[in-house]
Image (cartoon, rainbow, N blue to C red):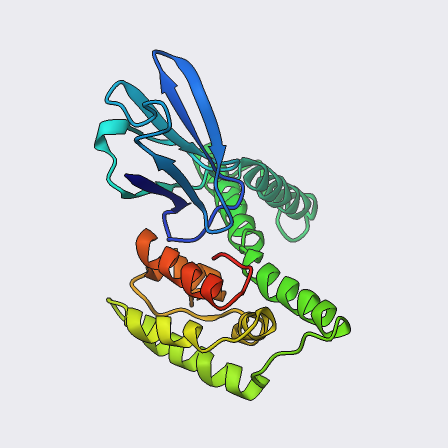
Amino acid sequence: MIYNLKVETTGGLQIPAAKVTFTRGGVALTTIPVNAASFVMVNDETDGGLLGSDVTVTASAPGFYDSSATGSQLAPDSYFQLQARPNYMVYLVGGGAAALLLAGMAGKKKRVKGFFDNIDPKVKIGLLAAGGLAAYLIFSKDNSGKKLPGAAKTELDQLAQAGILPTITETEAEALSSTLTAAFAGCGTDEYTVYNVFEGLKNKADLLTLIYVYDVRPYQGCFEGMIWEEAVTANLSQALSNELRGSELLHVNSILADNGIDFNF
């Protein structure tokens, strides 16, 4: 049986740098990086007992806490959700900036005489922490969603130079994007509508046009962003990964392959 082990963030987004390590008795058997769709595929009949009850399966990625399970705990479509580690460097920079600000205020004795020196130590710590948190919230926005549409546009231009043109217009791609957005909305996914959209793509230029036009747009599936985020956004690959189970995403990739499109979500 084929096991599709997906590694994603706690918000359901892909982690391109993730990997899955299989360990028995403290000895690593093998480490497999995720594919373009953030999956690791294991065949329990041919892969040398990687999913045995005595094997620990650990998903990891830079900047995230590990997540582990035993091989016997895994189902054919299993998800490892990794929680991001705090960015302590940002906290330090933000805290330092707050300290400098307060020190500067303390230097203006005519206006704030002895301001910093007279602050209770606990209040100082609170102010420094608040400064670090503010800096973190400002600078830690994830802009990775923009990478896929940009790469799609670049490859689309390269295909055009080779004489490979899309059979759909950007207006039609926008209509398809709106159809997908509606299929994703709310809790539950209209998988058949998703499949129909991809079945209508005739070549890779069509798919790249769809990815480029879809761009990064508000995502309204069953997803709860961080409490300070006013809106959650995702590119097409991120939305699909959050909406579709492993076998469903594989079906989308199968549709693309049947249409001669060399691309995997």
- Give the x, y percent position of residue 134: 52, 51
Q: Nearer the viewer, residue 122 or 118?
A: 122
Quarter-of-image position of residue 157:
bottom right
What residue is at 33 percent from the left and 62 percent from the top?
243
Numbered disc total: 0
Compared with 265, 133 (above or below) is: above
Quarter-of-image position of residue 56:
top left
Q: Quadrant of the N terminus?
A: top left
Quarter-of-image position of residue 84:
top left
What residue is at 22 percent from the left and 28 percent from the top?
72
What residue is at 34 percent from the left and 35 percent from the top?
43
Q: Nearer the viewer, residue 195 or 255?
A: 255
Q: Is residue 55 left or right of residue 137?
A: left
- Give the x, y percent position of residue 216: 52, 69
- Give the x, y percent position of residue 176: 45, 81
Residue 185 appears in the rendering = no
